[in-house]
Image (tube, rainbow, N blue to C red):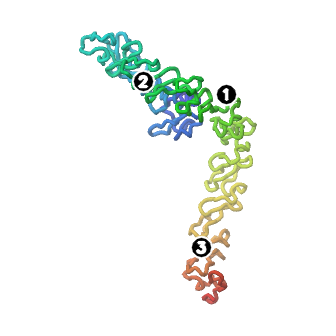
Amino acid sequence: MKAFSSLFCCLLLAVSAAGCWVPELPDDTLFSCATDADCAQEGVVCVARAGQSGFCCTPTAEVCNGRDDNCDGKADESFNFLTDSANCGGCGKTCDVETQVCVTGSCKSRGERLCDNGVDDDGDGFVDCADLVDCTNQSCGATCICLDGKRGEAVCGDGLDNDTDSSVDCFDDDCEDKSCGTGCTCRSFRMAETECGDATDNDKDGKTDCADTFDCSGVTCGNGCVCRSGAKAESSCNDGQDNDGDGRTDCLDTDCEGLNQGDGTTCSGGVRVESICTDSVDNDSDTKADCADTDCNGRSCGTGCTCASGLKTEVFCDDNLDNDGDGPLDCADTADCNGRACGTGCTCASGVRAESSCGDGVDNDGDGPLDCADTTDCTGKTCGTGCLCEAGSKKETACADGSDNDGDGNTNCADSDCNGRSCGTGGSTAKCSGGVCK
């Protein structure tokens, strides 16, 4: 129960634009996953964790909050707690930028107070940004910041070379993963759209929102909306909202066909249908729950149970369990198990286990006699190639194949079982008589 509040957070955030970091998430929760496909909503990914199953997460920009916002399996990795004055030693631990600098995770008094005047103010032999101890992450001008001992770009969407290194905005490696304006982030030396539902061409590539397929495919375009194939698509199909603005709501929108809504329903044929048939809940609000709802026909109603014709049906007939809860179990449940397998070489018949494999040397129905000796079940049944069970024994039936099919040491016409049987091949009418074929 210690993770309940975090799980509730995930329930809300997994279908919204926020990420969720729950390292203690138990393996058996609703949100565990092995692949992205296990997560119900588009745009939600499965984050792997060592020694545990993954968990479903919606990627957003990483902020310093102790969570894995961008769903890469790590929390707050965009941030250097050793040198970041805004997060010195941890998120939100701020140094006074006028008098302090962050050194190895602690706020220390600054010597160099000005990092853009071209003067070695503290006389330590290092000027401005070259003074790593005092000036790292400090301003070297209105749109400049000291990074790694040099001037770095601090504003990445103004079209200016703020650090005077001849590289502008996203073309400057200082700007990687930094904002290049509202709804824009620098990625791999280019502007990338990150707000895909604001009707704005944020990265100025001539394509807006979902039409920007390179950046927005699979990304949320608003509440209950995801970009798919260059257009807005409904992804929340049980909220009564036309989330993609195409005039169709929930399951009436073909975007929703086959989508699991996470509430025990799936859209099918333009309507919500029951998809969880074991929770005793009328998930699709049609006054019928579980197997009583014909939507559940063919679906599992639990271990060894399948819904059929509005009822629970036993399908595991060899586990000693009353899987459909109707009283009789396994073969005794004649309504469901007759004709079904009750194990290897065993089939339910008239309420009891019956031998169905009569040549494997095993008492498959557990009644004592095995194979042909089980006259109740095996008489008239095959006991292998060229062999038939008769009167409790194996009898040779293939009398021209040169094989001792019944294992009595005699082959073909030399086996008395073959008297009167065909011993010829093709169109021959020869039969066994007196131990020979004639």
Mark identifier at residue 245: 1
Q: CA distance from mark 3 to mark 2?
A: 76 Å
Q: CA distance from mark 3 to mark 1?
A: 67 Å
Tell me if residue 62 comes above or below residue 308 in the rendering. above
Q: Is there a contact, CB below 8 Å, between mark 3 and mark 2?
A: no
Say whether disc 1 or disc 2 marks the residue closer to the N-terminus: 2
Q: What residue is shown at x 36% (from left), y 18% (from top)?
A: 164
Residue that numbered label 3 is attached to:
385
Q: Quadrant of the C terminus?
A: bottom right
Dot 1 falls on a residue whose secondary structure is loop
Q: Say if residue 1 shows up in the picture.
A: no
Residue that numbered label 2 is attached to:
175
Residue 311 position in % (x across, y down):
73, 47
Q: CA distance from mark 1 to mark 2?
A: 35 Å
Q: Say if residue 152 shows up in the picture.
A: yes
Dot 3 falls on a residue whose secondary structure is loop
Q: Is there a contact, CB below 8 Å, between mark 3 and mark 1?
A: no
Question: Crowdedness of circle 2 by 10 Å Cα count: few (<14), some, many (20+)?
Answer: many
Dot 2 falls on a residue whose secondary structure is helix
